[in-house]
Amino acid sequence: MVTGAASGIGAAVARGVVAEGGVAACVDVDLDGARAVADSLDAAFALSCDVTVLRDVEACFDAVLERAGRLDGLVHSAGGSRGQAVPFLELDERRWREMVDRNLTGSFHCGLIAARHLAAAGGGAIVLISSQLSLVVRPGLAHYCAAKGGVAQLVKGMALDLAPHHVRVNAVAPGPTQTPGNSAWFDQPDVVAEHARTIPMGRVGQPHECVGAVVHLLSDEASFTTGATLLVDGGYTII
């Protein structure tokens, strides 16, 4: 099951899962977008879900099991900042709650229901898409950094509690990545150039560059890896 699968990293991951022989449940609040991705793949189907609503998440997982027969793993990619940089002194409760719900609460909802199903089935893997901003900060993004920092700690807490149930939980933390969800920033050449100057590899990332890390963490090759955050950030956090 891949959330946020209508575009960006989620869509790339869904393609990667199918390329590795899996069946991808492409889940997104944008059902038309999820269907477009699923229809382009040999082994995929689309479902609508608002990850900020627990009942919606529960119903979506039930639908996945009904369609696929079983669940082996979750990649939770829904979320993002959507270019909503706001100086801290201008933050209000609405913006705060929206950002936290979209990134942290959604991760909790999907992680919780996935964990219940996987534990009952004898095990599996969960990968939450975090951000390099779970570790460092940028101006105007205190609410986003706080939410993604919460995701990083949620991964550790889940991994600890779920290890006896043979459920591994890890995160992939992309650096600045050019996706439709952050087009408010990355459609501006000067913004792209500014980010590139802060990245040792000299450019922003592309969604497909996260796929290998995610597929690895889902696979048996990562059978002794849990509670980890794998950075895919072009070296952003090392300087």
Image (spheres, rainbow, N blue to C red):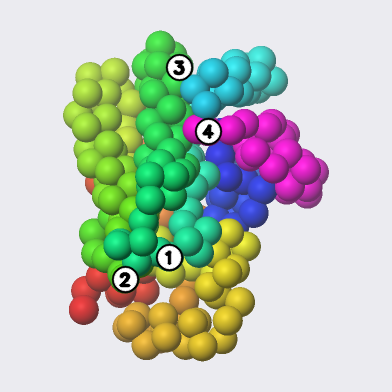
Q: Amino acid at mark 4?
A: Val
Q: Is residue 49 covered in magenta? A: yes
**What's drawn in magenta, residue-wise?**
26-52
Quadrant occupied by the N terminus: top right
| Disc sitting over residue 139 in the figure | 2
- The secondary structure type at the circle numbered 2 is loop
Mark 3 vs mark 4: which is more N-terminal? 4
Q: Which mark is residue 154?
A: none
Which circle's residue, 3 or 2, is located before the other in the chain? Answer: 3
Residues at marks 3 and 1, CA–CA distance in whole angstroms? 36 Å
Q: Mark 1 and mark 2: span between their CA atoms?
A: 8 Å
Q: CA distance from mark 3 to mark 2?
A: 39 Å
- Closer to the eye: label 1 or 4: 1
Residue assigned mark 3? 117
Q: Residue at x 36, y 61 (%)?
A: 90
> Which structural element holds mark 1?
loop
Q: Nearer the viewer, residue 16 or 109?
A: 109
Q: Name the residue that disc number 1 marks.
A: 85
Specify few, some or many for label 2: CA neighbours under 10 Å numbering under 14, 14-19, or 20 or more.
Answer: few
Give the mark nearer the N terminus: 1 vs 2. 1
Inspect the magenta stretch and tell me whether residue 147 lies in it: no
Identify residue for label 4: 51
Q: Position of residue 170 (x, y in %)?
A: 32, 42
Q: Are marks 3 and 4 in contact (CB under 8 Å)?
A: no
Mark 1 near mark 2, Cβ–Cβ under 8 Å? Answer: yes
Does residue 168 appear to the left or right of 164 in the view shown? right
Vertical placement of residue 15 versus 207, above or below: above
Label 1 is placed on what type of residue?
A: Ala
Determine crowd level at label 4: few under 14, some 14-19, many 20+ residues with C-alpha closer than 10 A.
many
Q: Where residue 207 appears, x then y in whole percent?
A: 54, 62
Instruction: Please tell me how crowded label 1 is: few (under 14), some (14-19), or many (20+) other residues with Cα within 10 Å.
Output: some
